[in-house]
Image (cartoon, grey):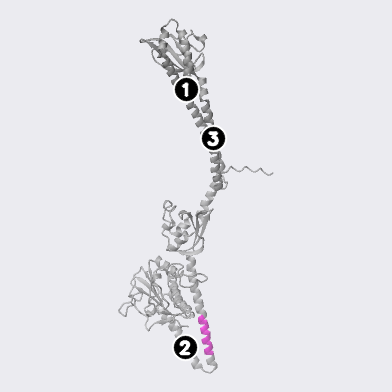
Amino acid sequence: MRLPALPRPRSLAGQLFAMQAVLIAVVVAGYALFTYVSDRRQAEESAARQATAVARSVADAPSVRAAIRGPDPTARLEPYALQVTRDANVDFVTIMDPSGIRWTHPDRAQIGGRFLGTIGPARHGRTFTETYTGTLGPSVRAVTPVTDGGRITGLVSAGIKVETISARIQDQVTALLGVAGGALALGAVGTYVINARLRRHTHGMNATELSRMHDYHQAALHAVREGLLMLDGRYRVALVNDGGRELLGLGGTPDAELIGRSVAGLGLPAPLTGALLSSEPRVDEVHLTASRVLVVNTSPVSGGEHRGTVVTLRDVTELQSLMGELDSERGFTQALRSQAHEAANRLHTVVSLIELGRAEEAVEFATAELELAQALTDQVVAAVSEPVLAALLLGKTAQAHERGVELVVSPDSRLDDGLLPAELPARDLVTILGNLIDNAVDAAQGSVRARVTVTAYASGAELVLRVSDTGPGVDPAHAGLVFQRGFSTKPAGPGGRGLGLALARQAVTRHEGTLTVTGSGEDGEGGAVFEVRLPLRASLDGDGHGLPPGDAGASPDGGRALLGGGRASLGGGG
């Protein structure tokens, strides 16, 4: 048996509309009731003042005093009282003796009877008002004494019936009800318009659904490891998750200072800030921070107007490092392939010499080739015996040779194995030196003397890496731009350009070093000189690790030229 579906709870907008409608109705009804009671009280007070004024006017009239002194007060006072009743717009004027016996009354049958009401205060000379039910029904009345020669000779009472007072405020009540109805209608229309807008913004969801969506939103926001940054229409931070804080280096900034802060004030690198401030979407752009390589995607949030921007951040720092290592491995593979090709040519030469019966010449040729190759390798290892950098130089030498560029190691180089501290990993050195060499080979390729010179040595408590080339050099105006991501004087390739030097500077900055570029490259033949100085944070001994003892010739930067016999040329090595 299929159970009937439970009715869906009313939407949040619907609930608010019902609550607001009831609230407006209660407020308007309460205001109308208060106004009615207030107006009625004011009408009664006005009637009491009017009755008091009429009673005092009659009591102060000389004709009334004279009539009271006469033999028949009723004959003279009754017409006068009726005339005043009509002219003063009251319901009755009763004149009586001090004991309360009426001399006048609108109903002549009541003349001579006792006044119904309080007269005690008036008999003692005081005017007062009261609401009392007399012969004409409930009325608001005033009673005042008539004095003649200091004596109280009579009393005067003037009054207005409650029925008359109610009739007077009837028109006011009608107008009040009209105003209340209009206010209720206007409030209902305004509430409907507001709640229709609210319903559109909440998509008709009820409070439970909104609460559940908020819980899911918070859980997903903090569970996603990628960075998520949301900006409002004025490019201020509206929301950032834990991953975004970490990737942008904002982990120590409290929410109170971060939310609502402009992107331009976050202290991010200029290219990354420009991407976040752009109104155009960005897709898989690579940007560098002080310690990370980020892939940035931006997507505008629009609904007829620019409402903000959603930014996603992916950390590809490790991926870039692995890609650098992969490039190095690829270089080694290409070097081995090149050497295998060269070795095959030489082997064919040796075999051919043997077939021609020239065995001695074959042995001499093979021995010379082996000695040359071994000498070149020994020269590199002697200059830079640190294994990772030595392998990098051998691989880059083969790559440069294939591109028609000679890569040489300066005789000023000396970097022994075990010199580098653990705080300076070989991976970062490969990133720094490899990208500088690649940049120099690109610059030198096609020049008259296509050559790149690498110098590596320890000077004092710092490691110095210098790469110079014979290329066109660096425009002094661009000296500060060459290290920015995306800057390149070469046409963009399939994978883009301008990232290598930025990665190198990032690694140098991470180790608190310096990276500079100057002109006058190889032997003053133009080109550019890139120099890196990294603190070693370790004491260097005097047994070949860094600065050797003695005075056997210091390098221009204080290093020792320990590779004798000239420059170690790897450009033509096998």
Cα–Cα span, label 3 and label 2: 113 Å
Residue type marked 2: Thr
Q: Residue at horizontal 52%, vertical 79%?
A: 337
Left/right of residue 549 with respect to residue 475 in the rendered view: left
User: Farthest residue toward the top?
Assistant: 71
Outermost residue on the left side: it is 551
* Closer to viewer: mark 1 or mark 2: 1
Helix, strand or loop for the magenta stretch, by majority: helix
Q: How many marks?
A: 3
Q: Earlier in the sequence, mark 3 or mark 2?
A: 3
Question: Quick one: SS at disc 2?
Answer: helix
Residue 491 rendering spot, x and y as whole percentages: 49, 72
Q: Residues within 10 Å of mark 3 (few under 14, many from 20)?
A: few
Q: Is residue 348 left or right of residue 2?
A: left
Q: Earlier in the sequence, mark 1 or mark 2?
A: 1
Query: Which mark, by number, is residue 44?
Result: 1
Q: Which percent across, then down, holds residue 219?
A: 52, 52
Q: Secondary structure at mark 1?
A: helix
Q: Which residues are magenta?
A: 338-351
* Numbered badge on residue 367: 2
Q: In front: 318, or 103?
A: 103
Q: Could you tell me how far apart the alpha carbons at marks 1 and 2 are, in whole angstroms?
A: 134 Å
Residue 155 at x, y percent in the picture: 42, 12
Q: Residue furthest right?
A: 1
Q: Nearer the viewer, residue 119 or 418?
A: 119
With respect to residue 208, does 444 lie above or below?
below
Query: Looking at the picture, which amino acid does disc 3 mark?
Result: Gly
3 and 1 marks in contact (CB < 8 Å): no
At 50% from the left and 81% from the top, the residue drawn is 339
* SS label for mark 3: helix
- The residue carrying mark 3 is 182
